[in-house]
Image (tube, rainbow, N blue to C red):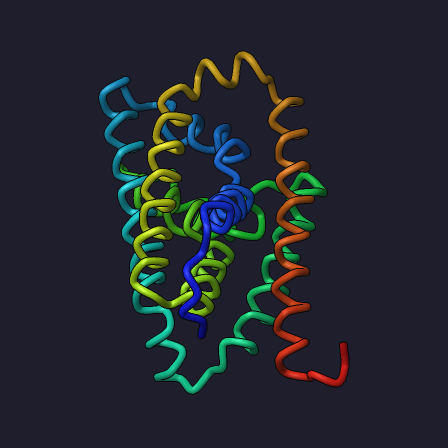
């Protein structure tokens, strides 16, 4: 755990990593399909509900993640390695174009069809604030666990959710501009960025756990 105060570039790195993990551009087609039966006001309400839920989940992970690890006796380096492996797995599915298949099983998909409000489940959890995003947030918070850094991370999460809200609000227009091919290209680029983030987590954890190995 470090009390070092991050500079602005550190928060940008956290924000970009979070954006790559959640991949809101890639979730756009899912959002549109889930809200296709709703009027414009209902779609806006679902959009707001989803992003507020994501903000609550990630902020809770940010402030309580370290305590949860201590309760279960898990070291941050072990969690960093496990989180890195998870992130790499998600990145590989994004690069191969398997959108959402690693975040939502068949039973959850079938339940989606009969839910009136999909903003919380499955849109916010697990499609947006999934295990990868939660793991990444906990890793950052435990590595830089000062109040100044936590405030900076919280601000980054709020800005991130606001950007997602804007993106989903313009979902029909964005889909027309990008098309499915454009969405697929962006998803794969996000997967490459995400792969680099996951590998960095693994290497950092291995260095601390096995100092003589690397």
**Image x and y of residue 174, in percent:** 49, 18
Identify which residue is drawn at 39% across, 27% down: 168
Q: From what the image shows, is residue 51 above or below residue 56?
A: above
Q: Quadrant of the C terminus?
A: bottom right
Q: Quadrant of the N terminus?
A: bottom left
How many dots with numbers?
0
Foreground residue among 201 and 134: 201
**Image x and y of residue 188, in percent:** 68, 37
Figure quadrant of residue 2: bottom left
Q: From what the image shows, is residue 20 above or below residue 145?
A: above
Give the side of residue 85 with respect to residue 130, left or right.
right
Q: From what the image shows, is residue 69 above or below residue 204?
A: below
**Image x and y of residue 208, in percent:** 62, 79
Q: From what the image shows, is residue 61 above or below residue 154?
A: below
Identify which residue is drawn at 67% across, 76% down: 207
Give the side of residue 151 with respect to residue 103, left or right.
left
Figure quadrant of residue 137: bottom left
Identify which residue is drawn at 65% across, 67% down: 202
Foreground residue among 41 and 198: 198
Give the side of residue 51 with respect to residue 199, left or right.
left
Identify which residue is drawn at 55% across, 65% down: 83
**Image x and y of residue 21, in percent:** 53, 48
Foreground residue among 152 and 176: 152
């Amino acid at each position: 755990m470090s009390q070092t105060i991050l500079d602005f570039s550190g928060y940008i790195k956290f924000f970009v990593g979070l954006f790559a993990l959640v991949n809101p551009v890639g979730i756009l087609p899912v959002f549109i399909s889930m809200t296709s039966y709703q009027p414009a006001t209902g779609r806006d309400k679902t959009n707001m509900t989803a992003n507020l839920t994501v903000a609550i989940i990630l902020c809770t992970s940010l402030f309580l993640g370290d305590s949860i690890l201590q309760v279960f006796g898990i070291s941050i380096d072990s969690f960093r390695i496990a989180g890195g492996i998870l992130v790499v797995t998600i990145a590989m599915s994004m690069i191969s174009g398997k959108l959402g298949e690693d975040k939502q099983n068949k039973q959850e998909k079938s339940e989606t069809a009969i839910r009136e409000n999909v903003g919380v489940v499955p849109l916010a959890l697990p499609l947006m604030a999934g295990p990868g995003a939660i793991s990444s947030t906990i890793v950052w918070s435990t590595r830089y666990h000062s109040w100044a850094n936590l405030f900076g991370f919280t601000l980054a999460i709020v800005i991130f959710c606001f950007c997602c809200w804007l993106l989903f609000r313009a979902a029909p227009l964005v889909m027309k501009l990008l098309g499915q091919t454009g969405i697929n290209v962006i998803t794969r680029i996000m997967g490459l960025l995400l792969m680099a983030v996951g590998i960095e987590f693994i290497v950092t954890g291995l260095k601390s756990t096995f100092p003589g190995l690397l």
